[in-house]
Image (spheres, coloured by chain):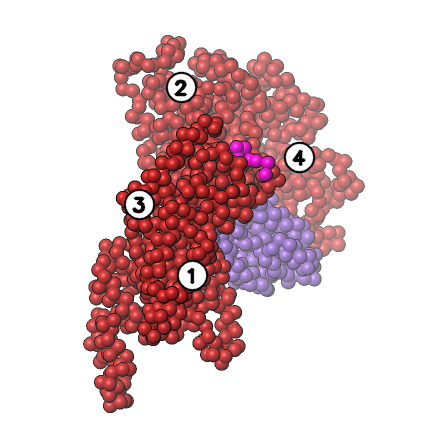
Amino acid sequence: MSETVPTSERNRGKMSSNSRDSMISVEDEADVFEITDFTTASDWERFIARLEEILHEWKLVNHKPRPPAMKDQYATGTWTEKSEEVVFADFRFTFTYLYLKIGEDTDAETGKQTQKGEDEDSDEDYKTPTVFLDLMNFDNDFPSRAHFLCRWYGLQEILTLTPVSEKQSIDSESRAKLLLSSASIALGNSTCSIPFFVQLQSRWRKLFTGTSLVKGGATVEFEMSHLKRLPSQFCHLAGLLDVFKSKLGCTYISMPPVSVSVRFTYILSDWIHGSWPQIPPDFSSSFCDGEVGYGDIDFLPFGACLDPINELHLSCTWPCLSEDMIVENSLYSDLDPLQAPQWSVRLQMTDNPQCLLGDFLNDFLKLSERHESTEEILKKVLPETDSDKDKANSEISNVLQRLTEPVPALSSVPSLGNVVSSASAKMTFRPEDAPIPDELLGKILIYLFPDAKTPRSAEEGKPNPSAKLSDDPSTSVSEASGEAKAPSEHISDVAAELNKKLKSSPTDSLTHKLSLALCHVNHQFGGLLAVAHLWQEFILEMRFRWENKILLCGIEKGAPNLGSCILHQKLQMLNCCIECKVKRESSGFGYGPDSLNIHSNPSDSVLESTSTSDTQNSLHKVGSLASSSGDDEDDEFFECEEDDDEDEAGDEDQAATQKKALEPHEAQRQKKESKSSADDDVISTRSDASQYQDSRTHRPEGRMVPMKNYFLLCSGEQLYIPITQEPSPMTEDMLEEHAEVLAKLGTTAEGSQIRARMQSACLVSDMESFKAANPGCILEDFVRWYSPRDYIVTGENGEEVPVEEGDGETSGNPGCDTNEEGEVNSPDSKGDVDGGTANKKTRSVQGKLSQRMQIPGNMWVEAWQSARAVPARRQKRLFDDTREAEKVLHYLSSMRPAEVVLHLMPNIVHAAVSKVAGEAVAASVPNAHSMLNQLVSRAATLTRSFSLDRHKYREMLHCLELAETISARTTSLRSKFTSNHLSSPAQEGKEEEIEGFVTSLLTQGEVSVRGGACGPAGAIIHKMFIAAQRSNNMILDDEEGLDILDSLYKKPLSRHASDRRTSNSSNHSATSSTGTRKNSDLSMPSPTQEVRSSASCADFPPASVREYILRAMVPRPAPYSKVLPQRMYCMLTDGDNRLAGAFTSDSTFQ
Amino acid sequence: MASRGGPQRPNGASQGKICQFKLVLLGESAVGKSSLVLRFVKGQFHEYQESTIGAAFLTQTVCLDDTTVKFEIWDTAGQERYHSLAPMYYRGAQAAIVVYDITNPDTFGRAKTWVKELQRQASPNIVIALAGNKADLASKRMVEFDEAQAYAEENSLLFMETSAKTAMNVNDIFLAIAKKLPKSETSGTPQPRQGVRLNNEQGGQQSEGGCCK
């Protein structure tokens, strides 16, 4: 304390007569005096001033004593931390205040305090300082989680000073003393009694020294010793008590009994009966053998390779005993874990249990970091010469294959793409160099394209190089089925939600399968190269299908679904193009056998039209293989189905329509005939096309359906709804591009004009179709159909009545569906009553265009005037399938594998989440529901975000991995606790409790075992320890081993003596000698006697951690001093022993 | 819109900056969508507004407290034929105004189907407003205010009766949308953070377990 003298002299100058004098003399200039004083301050003075400043800032000056912490509040409450940086000369420290947040209690208390007001002061004297309360508080002896200092000293608030840099440390005693005394000054000046600690030595040692100045004349010294080895005489309670008492200097007769809390922790790391149940999937045999639907391609691995639960820590606690009550010395111990009143268990999880799904997917995602293009990757394996191609290990099948094949060494033979496409030339690997073996490639391709199972090439009359395919024994997948639907196994809410929320693709779609296949190929066949190979094959297949007009299976028809991922949309787009191409070309070429077989739907619709020409009115629609005109030259024109309802005209089309009625098998035979008739048709239409007639006189064309009760205003003829071109299907990126182009035109009048003109193509096309279908029509007629609200009917009285929006009108609108047509067409529908009158009425109807349509020079009029009468099928195509298909194919082929991987991630995530969902539900993971909800919502936002962010996907996979780990832990733990070996009659009916125990173990940090060793969970844990002990000591189940063991366990006793002498080099032997080994020798009757009788070794291994808390109320330093709390915490574990003492001394009566 | 949609999000969340929002107008033809926009953007009204072809595009900026909100407005054509193009405009839109004509109950029915479609297919956080236009023709009213309001409440839509002709409620409805927008933007973002927290808790638990031995 000698250092502190000058400070107190100078610092606040209360004692110094010198400063007091100056205070008096310069009374008015007190401030000036202060300033002068500080400018001359040394580093040390500044350090103290800074500490005080911070204490003021944190409002710790004149700190009110805190209420005692409640039971277990250290573990359950929230701890808060404040920190600031402090400098002492050039040494930087972090000054931290850590305290238990009392939350509402404080609020309530402050409320009380304000209410009480004046009573407060009287209370204060009565209150025990927080430090004293904490030291003697038995309620938070071994908190399961708390700052180590709080745990060791039982404190609820502390101040710590630690060097900022790892390299700097306080390693000399004098430095530590200097810091402590400086802090004492600061704390004393600000009457702050919060314990203050300084960190010593290297940080990892967690070595601190501290002090606390308690108001009312007492100081607490916090001391600590940290030793690798403890002398053996101190390795037990008796020895520690000696240390404690000697530290207190208790030579008094009236030494009160020391109260003792003890906690022993036992570690179980060998799970004898409940070993980790995961059977790692056999990767080597995946989709190599077994024809069974290649289920293993869409099988995602799941689970952990290592047991996710590493250790079970059992802590046996004896709280608050008197030293007289228990004995533990080098020879004897009362501390039998089975007798411990409190048992608690915590799990030590494996750090990285190598989760299969996580690894599997992460490997795949890693590819997205590669920059090579597909070609660059494949170039490496493409052969330059054919030398050394006969490797010794090359398979016979390969050799045979080379002999039989027309084109040798077309490795990707099963790929249909190679059969025709010249592009396949790029893909000639030597069979042994191909990243994916031929056979497997074939199987994967069949998994992707189940409709290719039976080789088409045979039917096409071409040489059949895909002989391998036909070798496949199973041909169960018939072509007609078209789409193979993998039965979804987990039809649960989660699956439905995933389908709805995620922007991926349906689980049975080609895109989905492709992502799984690529994932597997990556895992199994050497990563990037194999992925590039399969991707290349996929692109070839896409091109092949486009060129050969084979619809993609597993891709739903119709315009791209904007709710799916972009790659899926592209494939849908390609499908649209193929469909369009089929429609366009098929009639010209007749029915190719392949297209007929594959597209069963269109041929079905042809079948439907087997009927008289009358009923054809209602069935005329959709037959996509309509037998209308069309050949190669028709490419330029939009092809739509033949308008059968021209039966009114009763023209030569009848012949063609009747051809459609033919049975499909006959169709082939009749092909030639129908072709010729189609040719006739072509001629006739050409003659039409050659001479565009005046709209009044030309023959009606492209009629779809008459619009009920609507008649042309001029001629009074029936108004027909024309067949119009379908709006172009667009993928999301096309829409975006399109909208961007339109938006770029800006908001000027000019821009808007151009924009309207750009968008008028569709309007003009519709007008042309309308004109063609309704000779002699005028704009009013068109508007009545197209935009009915723009035609104002003038009633008989001359008032303006908007045209009645009858049933026929709405359903007759363009864009209506086939289903509605029947209604439109049937003359007997509800409109029948006024049909007759309406007939006349509409004929004589008086009306006019709305005002806005009459604006001179408006776009509608302009467009109407420019439109010629051209039926949709001869119009310029609004949708250029060739161009769009090429765009898609180019898009696909220009993707680098890295991009492919990223684009498939939504599907992967989809599959993975549903896998996790299935497994987690199966394992009945606690809180599975909220965990899955979190995953789903996260996946939804991720897949819906516009950009594909690799890092976000990594995070997503990390979350999935976490969920997988949790699931694996649950499975593992449950299997451990429900193993048959452990069950006994006593446990019957207790399943629920055990289940609850397992659940809380998984969700909470430390769980207390109800009933300790006697409880159902405790009994199981006890058995686990016994089993582990037996296997460790190699005890067989039979009794033979007994004798040997008898001699065995006597040995340690003798060894024990020598241990003591050699100050037991290893803690292990020390503990085994002192602690638990005794249990077997001297154990008292235990609740599980029956188990014990057969075993001859200790039930429990030596305790790995032994903790003791010793407390006493003793006057210190002199017998006449105040009686003050004293406490020492001891932790003994292998190679790390710590004694942490808090010794209070009376500073008044020393 | 993806390219603009991306950076918009952070803007939407922060304050004192310019936020851009894509807004789309939907509804039966001749209910006054273009007139509403024209009134909002230029303060004009044409008795006979030319029928829109495809969709028109306009922008307008409004100030709201310390935020400047820029609306990119897509004014679509109401004809049935253009229905299939609508996704192009409401895709990625943060807000939509569904317009009907209070003098015509059919347009109200059509508005309902639009709302349904938006709820099903547009982005989940989209702010939908229902506007009963031509409120100046209240004498010919066919759709009751209460009916529409009840429907709007049921579907949690903003609702106002507007008149492009008298400018009644026109700015108000756009402002109401602007007010509602940033909130719904930020409400979408914290979800991923929760996911991370799960992770932290797990890690924390383990490390603490280690230090207490």
* Chain B shade: purple
The residue beneath circle 3 is: A1060
Q: Do the numbered discs 2 and 3 sit on residues whose CB atoms are within 8 Å?
A: no
Disc 3 chain ID: A
Residue found 39% across the figure and 39% down from its top: A352
Query: Mark 2 belongs to which amino acid?
Result: Asp
Q: Earlier in the sequence, mark 4 or mark 3?
A: 4
Q: Is residue A487 left or right of residue B207?
A: right
Cα gap from disc 4 to disc 1, whole angstroms: 95 Å
Whether residue A424 sits left or right of residue A1027 in the image: it is: left
- Point out the frontmost of discs 2 and 3: 3
In the depicted view, which residue is nearer to us: A662 or A977?
A: A977
Q: Colour of chain A?
A: red
Q: Which residues are magenta?
A: A979-986
Q: Which mark is residue A257?
A: 1
Residue type (three-letter) at the residue carrying disc 1: Pro
Q: Earlier in the sequence, mark 1 or mark 2?
A: 1
Near mark 1 (Cα within 10 A), the count class, few <14, some 14-19 or many ≥20, is some
Q: Same subunit under labels 2 and 3?
A: yes
Do badges 4 and 2 share one subunit?
A: yes
The residue that disc 4 covers is: A819
